Amino acid sequence: MTAFDLEREKKERYLINANNKTLAASLLGISRKCIYHKGIKEDKDLSCKHEIENLHLTHPAYGHKRVALALKWDKNKAIRIMNKYGIKPPRRKRRKLYLTRSVDNNHYTNLI
């Protein structure tokens, strides 16, 4: 082991034992403020996500505008939550156009 590895192990042991958040933040390369930050809207957004998913079970074609109308929300709230959790309304697949194949037995000449 090199001196750098020994020093790093000492720092890790110190972090585990002392719970020094300043040192932990500096080792992780983030600010100390980020350790204490907890999002306010996380719990609310999770419950809203479940509401949107339940609405999509009954009305699968609703986009953000109709979701907002049905749940009596603002349009921007519906957009934010749907983007955050990657919720997209299940869309119908496009039908392929099937063209009839020419049959080898029928040769049509120019009728003009």
Image: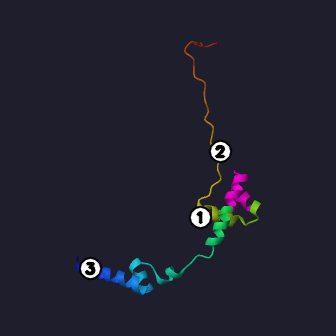
Residue type at mark 3 is: Phe
Image quarter (top left, top right, bottom left or bottom right) of the N terminus? bottom left
**Of pointers 3 and 2, the one earlier in the residue sequence:** 3
Q: Position of residue 80 (x, y in %)?
A: 63, 65
- Mark 1 surroundings: few (<14), some (14-19) or many (≥20) residues within 10 A: few
Q: Which residue lies at the image location 68% right of the left edge and 60% below the top edge?
A: 52
Residue to which mark 3 is pinned: 4
Residue 12 is drawn in which quadrant? bottom left
Q: Mark 1 or mark 3, which has the lower sequence index? A: 3
Q: Which residue is mark 1?
A: 84
Q: Amino acid at mark 2?
A: Arg
Position of residue 99 relative to residue 34, above or below, is above
Q: Quadrant of residue 30?
A: bottom left
Residue 56 highlighted magenta (yes or no): yes
Residue 111 position by quadrant? top right
Mark 1 vs mark 3: give the one in front.
Answer: 3
Residue 92: give x, y in percent of width and height.
65, 44
| Three-letter amino acid code at the position of disc 1 | Lys
Residue lying at 70% horizontally and 57% vertically, measured from the top left = 54
Dot 3: within a 10 Å radius of its alpha carbon, few (fewer than 14), some, or many (20 or more) residues?
few
Task: Measuring from the top left, give residue 13's x and y in whole percent.
Answer: 35, 82
- Residue that sits furthest to the front in the current view: 17
- Dominant SS of magenta comes to helix
Describe the element under mark 2 as helix, strand or loop. loop
Tag 3 and tag 2, C-beta contact below 8 Å:
no
> In the image, which disc is placed on residue 92?
2
Specify the segment rendered in magenta. Answer: 51-69
- As measured in the structure, the alpha-carbon distance from the residue carrying label 1 to the one carrying label 3 is 41 Å
Q: Secondary structure at mark 3?
A: helix
